Amino acid sequence: MLSKNRRPAFSLVELVIVIVIIGVIAAIAVPRISRGARGASDSSVRGSLAALRNAIDLYAAEHGGLFPAQAGDGTNAVGSELAFLNQLTKFTDAAGAFSATKTATAIYGPYLRAGMPTIPVGPNKGGANAAKVKMGNTGPVVSEGTGEGWVYNYLTGDIIANTDDVDEANVAYNTY
């Protein structure tokens, strides 16, 4: 005869089966989730490069073929990172001199709303210089040891990711 005070409960076998099923599901799901995060970084690099290249191309189209930092901006030297940033994030005149506000002569830009994007991959991601640009007039050549997130050639307008790391498809980010 069954006792009226006995409560229904799971047996040990039932609990083991449930734990095994949860383990199998986790073994399938975890690698897919981690690949999704990696794919997001790949997309972020592509998106950031597309935005930067579009801004550089639009600047050149509106400034007689000169790329940002190819001419001094009145305050910063030719080829300086500060000239590059000011010319892309502020209003500029036809010669590349910048202004924080739109004026009668500073009618172009800004080309980037929120400044330089940070690089989400490689040894420089998340670092203090992840949004910085290594300037040059040759290359651009990757130099991870310098800490900048991007490498830019102000004579050609080429910009690449400053990392030798590769994406999911084993393609180097600096070849995007």
Image (cartoon, rainbow, N blue to C red):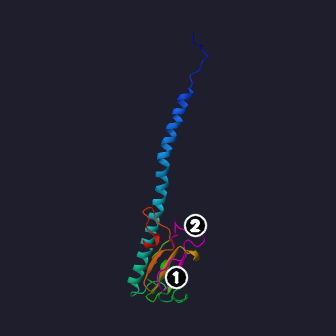
Say which element carries label 1. strand
Asked if residue 102 is positioned above or below residue 25 in the image, the reply reads: below
Look at the image and tell me whether residue 100 can be seen: no
Amino acid at the residue labelled 1: Met
Q: Report which residue position mark 1 lands on.
A: 135
Which residue is rendered at x = 46% and y = 73% of the image?
A: 174
Percent position of residue 50, x then y = 42, 71
Residue 98 in percent (x, y) is at: 50, 84
Mark nearer the N terminus (2 vs 1): 2
Q: Which residues are magenta?
A: 114-143
User: How many angstroms separate mark 2 from mark 1 (CA)?
Assistant: 20 Å
Magenta segment main secondary structure: loop
Image location of residue 158, percent across then percent down? 43, 80
Name the residue carrying label 2.
126
Q: Is residue 18 visible?
A: yes
| Image: 126 above or below 21 | below
Quadrant where the N terminus is found in the figure? top right
In the rendered view of the protein, which quadrant contains the C terminus?
Answer: bottom left
